[in-house]
Amino acid sequence: MNSNEHKALGVNGTMFAGTWSHLFGPGRFETQCRIVIDVKTQKLVAAQALSGLNWVSLSAAEKADLSESLFEANDVSSAPAEFDLEQIENLPDWAIPAVGKAAARVAKAFCEGLGSTLTASELELVCERNRSARDSGACHTHDFCDANAVMVSAFVTCGLVDSGAEVVTDDLQPVWNTAWRLAADAGFRAGAIQCPASGKKEVGGPVTLTNVRRSVVQFTVMHFGETNLSSLSLAQLVRECDVGECLSGTFGVVSSELLTRDQVDAESRKLGSDGAFFLDEDDAANR
């Protein structure tokens, strides 16, 4: 990235954001999602789903399913505007947690690298020039050193790229840009950057109850004994089943209680990557 062209708050020019309605498995209702994608790398950078009145993070399986719909089934990267996605210059605030943990570590290492490269007075001058610059996105660390090289070194320190690397790959660009913004906002002081606690789940809002009367794992066998199940809705099937009853090796009722989003994700992980949960029609009508 050219030092004269670097934007501290910007992304790489290939990011698009917008909303997307997605069906997470058969028998479920369409879910409204908000997304950020990189059309160059065909990567889903960040995504959240609307659950009640709150935006919540997707599980790994849900992200993979959504990504397949975006890039394989619909090829949104070829013409994002046709899907009402808009090019963005900065990551939206809600999307930052998706890359925030790695970015915070990189930003801290970057500030430490600058601290060993520049004097305190030079760093003060950088911050002053950044504040007074007409283009608020310009970063004047480049006036005193090869700041891009310092940033790459920070990626190496954090184990995100191999030692000796001179650039970072495109899929790490969101981390790069977010780290640069965090560092600039902190006045390039490592101590002012807070790294998120390890293992803490990042969500877009409070955890809320999801109206699930019966939670079932997605099934592939459409028969139970001699009964053909293919003509029945999942809601009808679930109402006929008791907790713990299996209709096939890959279909069973696992809960009859209201579940939180975290509990649903936990059950899905137990059941494997094909796990999926469905709303009962009666509960859906009362949402």
Image (cartoon, grey):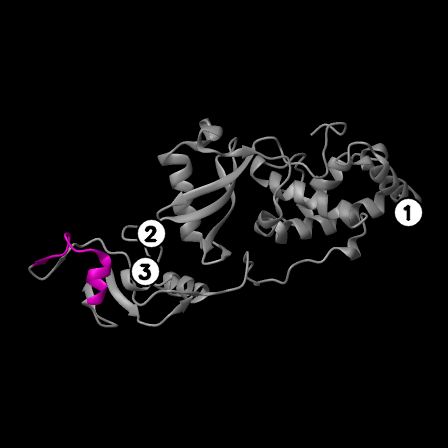
- In the displayed structure, 101 sits above or below 73; it is below
Closer to us: 87 or 120: 87
Q: Residue 151: percent from the left, percent from the top?
A: 72, 41
Q: Is residue 48 left or right of residue 175?
A: left
- Say whether residue 232 is magenta: yes
Q: Seen from this angle, which residue lies furthest right?
A: 121
Q: Seen from this angle, which residue lies furthest front?
A: 286
Closer to us: 157 or 19: 19
Gap between marks 1 and 3 measured at Cα: 62 Å
Q: Which mark is residue 250?
A: none
Give the residue pinned by disc 3: 285
Q: Residue 132: percent from the left, percent from the top?
A: 86, 37
- Packing grade of label 1 (10 A; few <14, some 14-19, many >=20) is few
Rendered residue at 21%/66% (across/down): 239
What amino acid is found at the position of numbered circle 3 in the picture? Ala
What amino acid is found at the position of numbered circle 1 in the picture? Ala
Rendered residue at 51%/39% (across/down): 18
Q: Which mark is residue 29?
A: 2
* Residue 177 seen in this snapshot: yes
